[in-house]
Amino acid sequence: MPRWIHRITPIVLSLMAASLANANSTQKRQTSVPLIQTKIERVNQITTPDDIVSLQRRLTIAGRANDIFTLFASELTYSQGKTDAALAADMRMLEHTQEPEVAARAMEMALGANKITEAQTIADRWQQIQPTETPAKQRLMWELAIAKRDVPQVLKNTDAVLSNANDYQLRRLFLKLAQFRLNNLNATDELNTPIHKTAVLHPEMAEALIADAIYGVTGAHEEQTIKALQSLLRLDTDIFPASQLTLNLINLKQPQYLLDFYQQTGVETMPAKWQSLYIELLIKNNKLQEAYQTLQPLLVKSKSADLYLQAAYLAVSQKSDTATIASYAERIAELGNRNQRSKAAMMVAMRYYDEHNLPASRSWAAKADDPQFAFDQALMMCSLEAEEKHWSAAQKWLNKAQSASKQGTFFSSRDLLRLQTFINSSSLTNRQYEQYLNRMLAKAEQSSAKTQEQDVPPLLLLRGLLYADKLNEPAKAVADMRRFVQMRPNQIDGLNALGYTLLSMPKENWPEAQKLLEQAYSLNSHSPAVNDSLGWAYFLNGDAEKALPLLEYAYQHQPESEVAAHLGEIYWQLGREKEARQIWAQGWLNKKSDHKVLNQILDKHGIKPASLPLTTAKTEIAHADAELYLRRVRLLEVMNTNAPVFIDNVNKVIQEGNASQRSEAALHAASYFYLNKNNAAAQEWLSKVTDNKFATNKAYLMGIIEVEQNNIPAAQQWLQRINQNNQQSANSDNFYALELSIYIDRKILQPKAYVHKLTQHLKEAQQLANITHDSKPVELILYMRGLAYAENLDQPKKAVEDFRALIKLNPDSADGWNNLGYTMLSMHKRYWAEALTILQHANQLDGKSEVIQDSLGWAYYLNGDPEKALPLLRSAYQTVQDSTVAAHLGEVLWQLGKQEQARQIWAQGLTNKNSDQKVLQQTLKKFAVNPVSLSASAPPDQ
């Protein structure tokens, strides 16, 4: 019901009760009802004395009704935000009725509006009307003490107030206590005892847990704080604002408490929002590498765009390759909202721009379609067009940026000014551009101090670059750049530009240049431009060995012609002339960068560009590009991203790569489609795996697919190939052969013979494990033998023994835990509670597995909780229409009274001839359902 009606109901009921009581007794105190006074006088004139009592009763009822309507009107006024008017009405009503309930409601209104003076007035009047203490009066007087920050009074009654409050009141009181503590962080810790005592009795009440955590952290009670957070975690998976405020306070007061909470509770089992908060906490504490490492296993199971955004940010900060960052952005594109997708797209666009991969940068920038990023996108597109000298298009994007907000997430008004100045120069000669910059500088220098600080440095840098690169006036360039560095001493652009320009002047300037560039390098050791400049400075100052790794790094991350010229010169001076010619050839093929410095170097050595190994360089460039795409393929497969994006990157490797790269990409594609239940596509891609390096991997996957398709002779042929490869290889791995042979034996041997053979394998594997310390073969055999005991020999106790041995060897095996728990569900019901706990743990290890979701749902059902079972079984069945899952889901639906849905699910399960229908047939028999009577139509909306 609406809030104001909810609040007035107790008062109305109170008045109605009083009306009924008063209607049955003679009133000593007359209640005037001015609105109907005329009618009363007329009635008195025509009424006999015998009717006086009856008349008085009717008048009392009428007066009470009038009071009720007045109170309703007051509540309506209050609900519209007119607190003063509502309070005035209630004050008049209080004087009129002398009812404690009206006083209570009026005081609630005053306290809710933080009108402490009015609340005190009402409290005083209430004390006169009702001198005795009541729980309601005590509570509101205590709330008044909270509002007045009267600590002694609050301390005096907190225990009693909390003990007498109902759940609705408790929620409000705990929030008031939390706010009270936030306003008095240095106050006494005495309140903690009654608050904690009551809070632990209400683990289902978020407000209680928030107050408990706040008083815990401000009173240095770590265990209390952590336990409150652990309970809050179960209630608030999305982290609502009040929870966020609490966590922020803990991070401010006792950040170690928060870290301990995460470590004790286990980040990997938490909801995505809490995981994201932990990563944010590590970032705030500048633990970037730890944050990035923590994220990696979380991403494998995560469907949280927030986590992938953090991964992208950390990948940038950790200088990961662009393929990694782009793969995270692809995942965000699948999972995130418009804002998240746009932010990720801009991050990738900027990284590609830094690498001078302009087509890729343009493609990603175009995806930033959230209006919040309109300014950023416009400046990014403007930069791209300007880089390619598309001046008209650049001007259009510049105009768009100027019409948007002058501050974006990634770019600012200073970037706008720099681009505006650069683009305006496109239609000018060098000297005209110089004059334009002179005018802009003069205008900026005559502006306010704030404007000067913002606009003068970038204009100085632009003019300095003009003098250095276009007008060949290095002395003027150095003068402008020195002014820039003086104003912005820690900005690497200025330090790098000044240092590099000094290298073009007489050699007495080179030591100073090296110092400036070393300072720039200390600020950002990952900048390709700074690595190139500093490497060149070391070379000119006579230290080619020190220069080499810097220039190699610069060329790896920014393969421009000028960097190629520098790196090739180092190779040449170190006697590595073949490598020098290869690098120069690659630089010459880069038509998007200026060849001026490269031409100078080639002329110096008397080398004609046509004599360079250009064909080989083209191939090497293509293979380098293919390696980048292959890295993305590996990441996208792990993240199981959408097929078009994944295959697009595979095809790029196929087009650009060498034989090994093409085979690896095809193998990844085959694995991807196999895991997504598309064996035909997997086999097609496996046919493209031609490199012998991947022959065993190909034979293994081909063999597994043939086993699944019951083509045993073909599977045996692939097993033979694996064995042949192992005999020919010095570094053979027999695990693939073992696994495939076990799968084949499972198909062709009787269960007892199969188990006997597995037992022999197990003894051999255990002996080998004692030497190699590799338990993988043992784990595999225990897993497969456990399945055979459970599914084929009806010996669940032996299966349980094998699965327990498996998880002892590998506690992180989600499949091991799942099979252990599911097998126990087939045993006596005394094992079902333990099975549920085991399957809950399996689900924590792998929350995306439809097999585990089916097992856990079935466990909830058998333990008497079909409501919890249903969403898990629905989720499992949506992913895989297996007959056993259909049996489970149908039974739960049937028991919940949804028989028609159950019948349709069972009918669909019967149509799946590729899965074992044993459990489904048993279920139909249990409910006396004839399979012929079922219709496999789509189930109704769920």
Image (cartoon, rainbow, N blue to C red):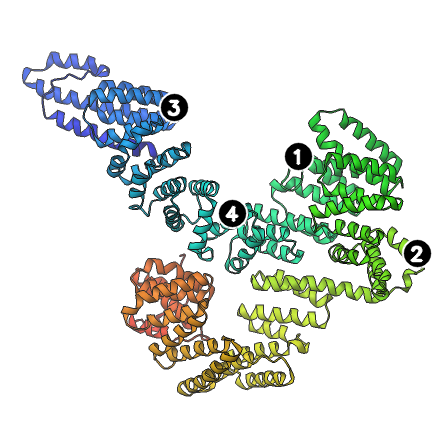
Nearer the observer, 326 or 19: 326
The kind of secondary structure element at disc 1 is: loop
The residue pinned by badge 3 equals 82
Eyeballing the image, is 246 above or below 45? Answer: below
- Of badges 2 and 3, the one in the foreground is 2
- Mark nearer the N terminus (3 vs 1): 3
The residue pinned by badge 2 equals 604
Please indicate, yes or no, whether residue 769 appears anywhere in the rendered image. yes
Separation of disc 3 and disc 4 at Cα?
Answer: 42 Å
- Mark nearer the N terminus (1 vs 4): 4
Eyeballing the image, is 695 above or below 477? Answer: below
The kind of secondary structure element at disc 4 is: helix
Query: Mark 3–mark 4 contact, CB under 8 Å?
Result: no
At 42% across and 80% down in the image, what residue appears?
Answer: 785
Which quarter of the picture shows residue 156? top left
Q: Amino acid at mark 1?
A: Lys
Q: Amino acid at mark 3?
A: Lys
Q: Residues within 10 Å of mark 4 (few under 14, many from 20)?
A: many
Separation of disc 2 and disc 3 at Cα?
Answer: 86 Å
Q: Position of residue 768 (x, y in %)?
A: 51, 81
- Of badges 3 and 1, the one in the foreground is 1
Separation of disc 1 and disc 2 at Cα?
Answer: 48 Å
The residue pinned by badge 1 equals 406
The kind of secondary structure element at disc 2 is: helix
Which quarter of the picture shows residue 871? bottom left
Q: Position of residue 801 (x, y in %)?
A: 37, 76
Separation of disc 3 and disc 1 at Cα?
Answer: 40 Å
How many numbered marks does the figure carry?
4
Nearer the observer, 367 or 725: 725
